Image (tube, rainbow, N blue to C red):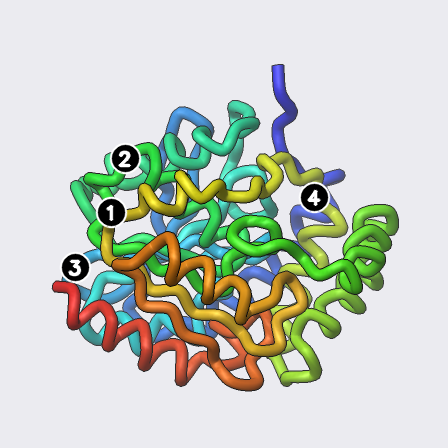
Amino acid sequence: MGRIGGFKDSGSVRHYREIYARVRAQWPPGAEDLRVDTRFGGTHVIRHGTGPPVVLVPGSGATAANWVPNAGALAASYTVIALDTLGYPGLGTQIAPIGRPVDLALWLEDVLDGLGIDTAHVGGLSYGAWASMQLAWHAPRRVDSLLLLEPGGNSIGRPPLRALPTFLRMLVNRTEAEYERFGRLVEGGWPNDPDRQRLVNYGLAHYRSSVPMIRYASDEQLHRLRMPSLVLLGENSIVHDASKVRTRVRRLMPEACVEIIPGAPHPLAETHAEVVNEKVLAFLKSHG
């Protein structure tokens, strides 16, 4: 039997929830917190707005609350459904392992079913983008469009060799200080909210994560993504070569709109929220 994610001790849980509450308080008034039961456990969801549903899956260690820079703009025209990823830190309670990439698709299907949603615009940042791709491969009829914001390293593009020592050091030294150092590098010097940063760094350091590792998408897999797709890449991302990813997407996903955002680092949904929101809204409005 696979491993279940969980915090290391009760003190970590209490402190993490305090940080989470501070980030959650940044959301616009009217956003509601929900628990959706799935075969893998209870998933925490923040829902806000009215209109067609847009499901947002966060990057590694981030949460539903971390989508606050994007929620207000999107919720003006859409129902934002922001998720905590089971197997990563968050407010959910995992009861069964998520060991295979397809399990991420099954989990997302269960969330949609639990919310009474037949189809939705689905996407995410980094790991969340890769998780969203699993649903698009497994159950394409559930995905109206795909929003891939800086897909995680080694999903569509290979990480550059110069970045590998940095990734390896983080994997070996799983402390909050190391995650903070790594986060500053990934952000490329762009300012970010300290509580949102702390939520990710503290969670990763004090939670035993249990999720599938990102696997490189084959040409055949990418070619199967026939739904309308938006791929936004950061010019200064350290997880892949943005120009190479753009070339590959254009070759294998002809229905996709792919853009490189000048000067943006990997976590561009936060550091470049205004331009990301503008491009996502324009794409969604042009695709129903």
Q: Position of residue 114 (x, y in %)?
A: 26, 36
Residue type at mark 4? Tyr
Quarter of the view holding residue 135: top left
Question: How many other residues sit within 10 Å of disc 2, few (<14), some (14-19) or many (≥20)?
Answer: some
Residue at 63 percent of width and 35 percent of height:
210
- Compared to residue 172, the image places residue 99 above or below, namely above
Query: For the residues marked 4 and 2, what is the alpha-carbon distance in whole angstroms?
Result: 30 Å
Horizontal relation, residue 213 to residue 230: left or right: right
**Pair 4/2: label in front:** 2
Q: Residue at x 35, y 45 (%)?
A: 223
What residue is disc 3 on? 52
Tell me whether circle 3 and circle 4 mark residues in contact (CB < 8 Å).
no
Q: Which residue is mark 4?
A: 207
Q: Is residue 24 left or right of residue 171?
A: left
Where residue 48 sits in the image (x, y, percent)? Answer: 28, 64
Q: Are marks 2 and 1 in contact (CB under 8 Å)?
A: yes
Q: Secondary structure at mark 1?
A: strand
Alpha carbons under labels 1 and 4: distance apart: 31 Å
Q: CA distance from mark 2 to mark 1?
A: 7 Å
Q: Where does the image place residue 116, in percent across and percent down from the top left?
A: 18, 40
**Which residue is tagged 2?**
139
Question: Compared to 107, does 128 lie above or below?
Answer: below
Q: Amino acid at mark 2?
A: Ala
Label 3 sits on what residue type?
Pro
Q: Of marks 1 and 4, which one's residue comes earlier in the chain? A: 1
Distance of label 3 from label 4 (alpha carbons): 34 Å
- For label 4, the SS is strand
Q: Residues within 10 Å of mark 4 (few under 14, many from 20)?
A: many
Observer able to see residue 17: yes
Element at label 2: loop
